[in-house]
Amino acid sequence: MKIAVTFNNGEVFEHFGHAEKFKVYEVEDGKVVSSEVIGTVGAGHGAMAGLLSDNSIDALICGGIGEAASEILNEKGIEVYSGISGNADEAVEKFLKGELESGGANCDHHHEDEECEGHSCSDGCGSCCSGCHHEPLFEGKNVGKKVKVHYKGTLNDGTQFDSSYDRGEPLEFECGMGMMILGFDKAVAEMEVGEIKDIHLMPEEAYGEVDPNAFFIVDIENLPGSENLNKGEQVYLRNAYGQAFPVTVVEKDDKKIKFDANHEMAGKELNFKIELLEVE
């Protein structure tokens, strides 16, 4: 049996659709025998169901999750335990003891009635694509095949924002099926095993342009804990439906605070070094 947990710094990550890593536990005779952390670079929340299925996951433990994503996972035979927080290893132990209770689908895409979740800035380039596709998005000799790659992502100034080399685990995905940001996916589609390719992506082939509608203002008195936030800090907010989503503080005065809910890589040009290791 395999159990996957949305993962960040040892904790259950708050939102399935924004998870950048899963911790995968191999279980035999009711006990964990091994575990590994895998990346989800470029995968959208629907597409990650395919990633978990490809890794033969039987159960998912996560924080918030939407009804559509939960249904996709169930269709793939993956049991979902949502609304979970705290230490990831302890959550798995509770699951194995039959003590873990799921909160059901508890995520939507609104920003009303937020509550401040506290500071939490995750590493990696995150997850932001349009979702899983049943038909290939483009042509290429590797399209529709399961591929394994190592990669390093940098900004134009040379700042590294993600690297599978540093994690020591390559990334696996089905090429051309919407599991990756478009430019990354297209680059892999024509690569040869053993080839190393450097690519430069404009925002439209990465995480898109900055959406002005993703900025919103909240009264500090209605958001407990926000009085202690500073400009530039990243936090997670949770709305009345249980959705946890990352935001950045962009402005603040004595009464109001302005947040940016755009993906942290929105509007940015990205560079990737990609090494194709395997094609199945």
Image (spheres, rainbow, N blue to C red):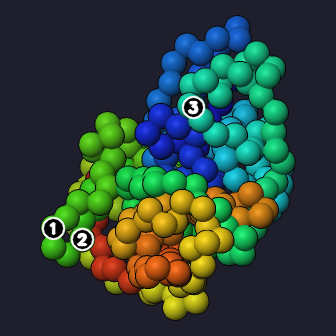
Which residue is painted at 38% across and 53% down in the image? Answer: 123
Label 2: how many Cα within 10 Å (few below 14, some 14–19, many 20+): some
Q: In the figure, 61 relative to 17: above or below?
A: above
Task: Provide the residue designation for mark 3.
Answer: 88
* 172 vs 244, nearest the viewer: 244
Q: Are marks 2 and 1 in contact (CB under 8 Å)?
A: yes
Give the number of the disc on residue 197: none
- Image coords of residue 40 (percent x, y): 50, 52
The amino acid pointed to by label 2 is Leu
In 3D space, how far apart are the residues under numbered discs 3 and 2 (Cα atoms)?
Answer: 31 Å
Please tell me whether mark 3 sits on a helix, a strand or a loop. Answer: helix
What quarter of the picture does the N terminus occupy?
top right
Give the number of the disc on residue 158: 1
The amino acid pointed to by label 1 is Gly
In 3D space, how far apart are the residues under numbered discs 2 and 1 (Cα atoms)?
Answer: 5 Å
- Image coords of residue 124 (percent x, y): 38, 55
Please tell me whether mark 1 sits on a helix, a strand or a loop. Answer: loop
Give the number of the disc on residue 155: 2
Q: Nearer the viewer, mark 3 or mark 2?
A: 3
Please tell me whether mark 2 sits on a helix, a strand or a loop. Answer: strand
